[in-house]
Amino acid sequence: MTIHSVNAKRASRSTEARVAAQDWRVLVTELNVNGCAVMPGLLAPEECADLAALYPHEEHFRSHVVMARHGFGKGEYRYFKYPLPDLIEGLRTALYPRLAMVANDWNEKMGVAQRYPAEHAAFLKRCHDEGQVRPTPLLLQYGPGDFNCLHQDLYGALAFPLQVAVLLSEPGEDFTGGEFVLTEQRPRMQSRAEVVPLKRGDAVIFAVHNRPVQGTKGYYRVNLRHGVSRLRSGRRHTVGIIFHDAR
């Protein structure tokens, strides 16, 4: 067994404990009602600092995206390469089983046949069998005036319907502005915007694409997009945990 695999197993146990300590009854209710939910204090300040400090070190990443070049907004991000940092790998493994239960419930309500296996490794195998083999967890960096346009992180035919973003910087100290924004488009209605207040170390779970909403005649689908409002000052780092891999 390699040193990395030993460290990954330790990180997985550590993250499993902190993920299990969250109030999942409340989180699932929030997801069902609002399409997003906040896990307070998922990461410690020193863990946030350690992850943010990885950004300049290219050896941890497979690609670098400057948003303005693609019309995505302003700012930049880097996709991690395999093997992922132990903490990211541990969070991805620990969060997935709980979110898979929500995802399966949502698909049943929306009449979608797709069901997700209980363990993340089994879901990744499905991705890789479909040719989606590139890791998707990413580290984002914003400076003054930067923003992220509303979007959906799909990356291929096979997409897990929930993802997680962890704020690594402290609002009001490291940066101002830069709020996480979620919009929801219901059929024949105006879009609804949700601004999610986060502190350093907080994680937001949110719907990637669609979610079910109870109507008078049963459940119907709504379409969601997420982004980040304009940064007024400072620097903001976020880690995104996406559960499907990309082509």
Image: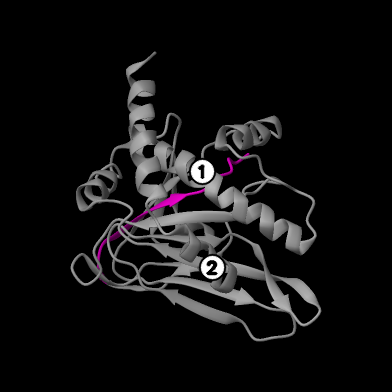
Could you say which is closer to the camera, residue 136 or residue 42?
42
Name the disc covering residue 67, or none: none
Q: Position of residue 97 (x, y in %)?
A: 55, 44
Position of residue 145 relative to residue 25, above or below, is below
Q: Position of residue 180 (x, y in %)?
A: 42, 69
User: Is residue 30 highlighted in magenta?
Assistant: no
Q: Residue at x 60, y 35 (%)?
A: 124
Q: CA distance from mark 2 to mark 1?
A: 27 Å
Name the disc covering residue 136, or none: 1
Q: Position of residue 116 (x, y in %)?
A: 67, 44
Q: Residue at x 24, y 44 (%)?
A: 50
What amino acid is found at the position of numbered circle 2 in the picture? Answer: Thr
Q: Secondary structure at mark 1?
A: loop
Could you say which is closer to the camera, residue 235 or residue 167?
167
Q: Residue under circle 2?
A: 29
Q: Which range of residues does the magenta coloring cover? A: 233-247
Position of residue 129 relative to residue 114, above or below, is above
Q: Position of residue 99 (x, y in %)?
A: 55, 51
Position of residue 48 relative to residue 144, above or below, is above
